[in-house]
Image (spheres, helix red, strand yellow):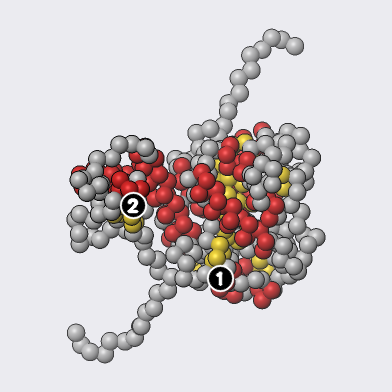
Amino acid sequence: MLPTLSIEFDNGNIGAVSPSEDSLFGVIATISDAPEFPVNTPIEVSNMIDVVKKGITERIQTNRLYKFLKEYYAEAGEGNRIWIMGIDENISAALFTPDPTTGEAPAELLLNSANGKIRALFTVNQNTGAVLGDNPFIPVISAAHTFAVNYTQKKYAPLFIVNEAFGWDNLATSLPDLTTMTNNRSGVIVGDTVKSVEGSAIGLLAGRLAKNQVHQNIGKPKDGPVSSLSIFVQDKKAELADVEAIHNKGYITFRTHTNKSGYFFTHNLLATEIDDDYRHITRRRVIDKAYRLTYDVLVDELLDEVPVTRQGTISEIYAKTIEGAIVNRIYTQMTLNGELAIDASDSNDKGVIAKIDTTSNFLANGTMQTVIKVRPFGYNDFIKVQLGFDTVNN
């Protein structure tokens, strides 16, 4: 063989999107016997070339994870980073249950590897079709919520978790009602791109969330249909399934719209009561982003010197400085990006207010009491029109 020089063109590094930290997600999936991608080994990928290079393919050992990532990138676009980790057992509450020895849940390994930057976590089961009729995903919902709450408090890194509905008998009436629960950091998706009882098109959901800003509802028709041409609820096409009953029970699923082609998400619900402020993923993502920005400002103030008045209260000047720093950070990172609502009639409105208590005795306890409020958008859940003829000559 003649001496040669081999130069190959790499591909998929530029990407078709401008990734945002708001869309840095993670996925934990059941895999089996995949030596190129061992279990409990968190990695980060940014395109399908990375995925295949890591040994994640359509073969049976990794096919469900491959399907998730293929649908994720079809929806979100190449270039979006996502953290992935394989486990060797099906998704269960144990994934989110702290080990009695270490105090850490298995899912924490992935989140810690990303240094708390993951905003949402998705789970994918490899083999679930053998379990029917007992809704085995239900215990996962509460465990995931509790885990997310605890992780947020411990790491100041808020997130929400979405799981698949599996092991139910294809009747909407058999699905437990999620609106009776209080899990506003955990949700469930129903529906898949293939006829299946083993999982869902959760990759499409993750991809649409990654593509959207935090305040945008995944079901908005203006954003267009999902990238898949077929959506099933187990063995029925989505348009023939009782998606209204599924939606009314608090699940994320798919629908069609008359005279519009393709499939759309019904809504962005979490498994909690209807009157919960954070029932919708949009509200959860908005408040979580404000949380992270507030933390970034205030963490630098810990153990700093605070000027006080003769009465031992916090100085008004100091309070205004800190309040201004909080408002400015949230305003520039959210309001100016169109992620918070403002009152157009008030030129001074920034969509956020911050107030530090300057009346209580700060010297007595060293606690800076702070209240921060952000204003979310409203959403057209229902549109009511009265249409008729005008018989008066105007």
User: As shown in the figure, which amino acid type bears the numbered disc 2?
Assistant: Gln
| 195 vs 363, nearest the viewer | 363
Picture layout, residue 17 above or below residue 141: above
Q: Would residue 196 appear left or right of 301 to someone viewing this image?
A: right
Tell me if residue 12 can be seen. yes
Residue visible at 73% across and 70% down? 169
Q: CA distance from mark 2 to mark 1?
A: 33 Å
Circle 2 sits on which residue? 369
| 12 vs 283, nearest the viewer | 283
Residue visible at 63% across and 63% down? 190
Circle 1 sits on which residue? 179
Q: Quadrant of the C terminus?
A: bottom left
User: Residue 351 falls in which quadrant of the image?
Assistant: bottom left
Q: Quadrant of the N terminus?
A: top right
Picture layout, residue 187 above or below residue 60: below
Measured as percent of width and height from the top left, residue 102 is found at: 66, 41
